[in-house]
Image (tube, grey):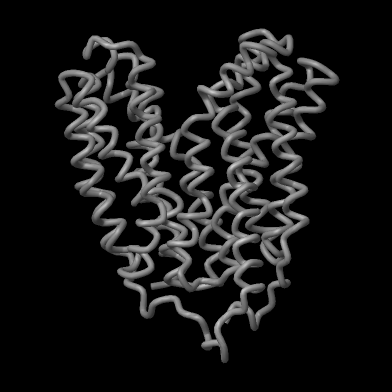
Amino acid sequence: MSKSWVVVLLGTSQTLAWASSYYIPAILAGAMARDLGVEPSTVFVAFSCAMLFTAFLGPRVGRAIDQYGGRVVLLASNLIFILGLAMLAMANGPVMLFAAWLVLGLGMAMGLYDAGFATLAGLYGKDARSAITGITLIAGFASTIGWPISGLMLSEFGWRGACWGWALVHLALAMPINLMLPRPTQRAAPAAKPAAPPTAEAAKETRRTAILMAFVFASGGFAAAALAAHLPALLVSAGATPAAAIAAGALMGPAQVAARVLEFTLLRRAHPLLSAKIAQVTHPIGAGVLLLLGAPFAPLFVLLHGAGNGINTIVRGTLPLAVFGAAGYGARQGLIVAPARFLGAVAPALFGFVVAAFGVHALWFTAGLSLLAFAALFMLRVAPESPEARR
């Protein structure tokens, strides 16, 4: 099976996985809360617990992909999604609500981007970079597709019917798609065994590099999750009207996709470290422009922030692959991105306190984090990619 066909298949199944899990609270939370007799915030707390669960499970899922291949794990994720959505549809109170979201958290750990990246690393080794970019280009439209579908099912069948509907999508569409993915022909392994065990200094350098990467991805994850929850309010605080804030916020999706196209074309032959540096510097530039020049520049801020988010998603998969190689990628990736997943789960609540205290000036905090991450990237010691290195 050609790599392009694999990208289409995996990108489609990723779109359905994101649309039926990560993106459903935005549409269904209100109706869900009213029916269950809880506050909408309770639904989002349950969702945050699910996201925290994915951080805990990430390394274990990665090891499973390294051992058994991504196809098996992705197929299992479809079954878990079906179970979680069915539990959510049958929930009759807070206990069942939280239990259902924990099951969905397991499904997200097994079926979203990081699992997809590890699947591609197992299939193509270091040549997986273009495929990783390709699936993010397709799945970047998950909210564009998922929100209207969830809204339609909500209006026609209620929120419980919407959950059953997404469960059926996994059974009838996502699972057959993942079943078509190729099995890895061989497990990712080092090209040759070293003549001697790594020295203590080499092991220390590897840990240092992994910690720096984890910090970079955690900084980007915090800013992305914080702004996803508070962007319109921040723009209003900067002086934009509510209508203008919503209009500017709508540029986020196109900016992310455009940046991924840039990564797929102009940056595809550059080392992922360059992409990582671009991704980290765009948010502070945009924040500085907005804070210094005010609301008329809100669209420019959103475009720059969205572009950084779009590239960051790709870099999270490609930079560890380029630096450490494909051997043990899944487990290592799970460990490196675990802090980003954790901060992504708690960022909306934590950043809310900062916004309440400082308004739009809360952006100095996320801009500072991004600049620290940008500086950390210059501390990484990586060898340039070469055709030989990708073999």
Which residue reaches farthest bottom? Answer: 195
- In this view of the protein, can residue 4 be seen by the observer? no
Which residue reaches farthest right? Answer: 292
Note whether 20 is above or below 187 in the view shown. above
Residue 93 quadrant: top left
In the image, 297 versus 331, the foreground residue is: 331
- In this view of the protein, can residue 132 be seen by the observer? yes
Q: Where is residue 44 drawn, in percent x and y?
A: 38, 23
Residue 185 quadrant: bottom left
Residue shown at 22% from the left, 37% from the top: 84
Residue shown at 19% from the left, 32% from the top: 164
359 left or right of 165 in image: right
Residue shown at 67% from the left, 40% from the top: 307
117 left or right of 233 in image: left
105 left or right of 59 in image: left
Q: Where is residue 49 drawn, in percent x and y?
A: 36, 32
Residue shown at 38% from the left, 80% from the top: 186
Residue 27 quadrant: top left
The N terminus lies in quadrant: bottom left
The C terminus lies in quadrant: bottom right
In the image, 126 versus 248, the foreground residue is: 126
Note whether 358 is above or below 219 in the view shown. above
Q: Where is residue 52 drawn, in percent x and y?
A: 40, 37
Q: Where is residue 175 drawn, in percent x and y?
A: 25, 53
In the image, 33 versus 170, the foreground residue is: 33
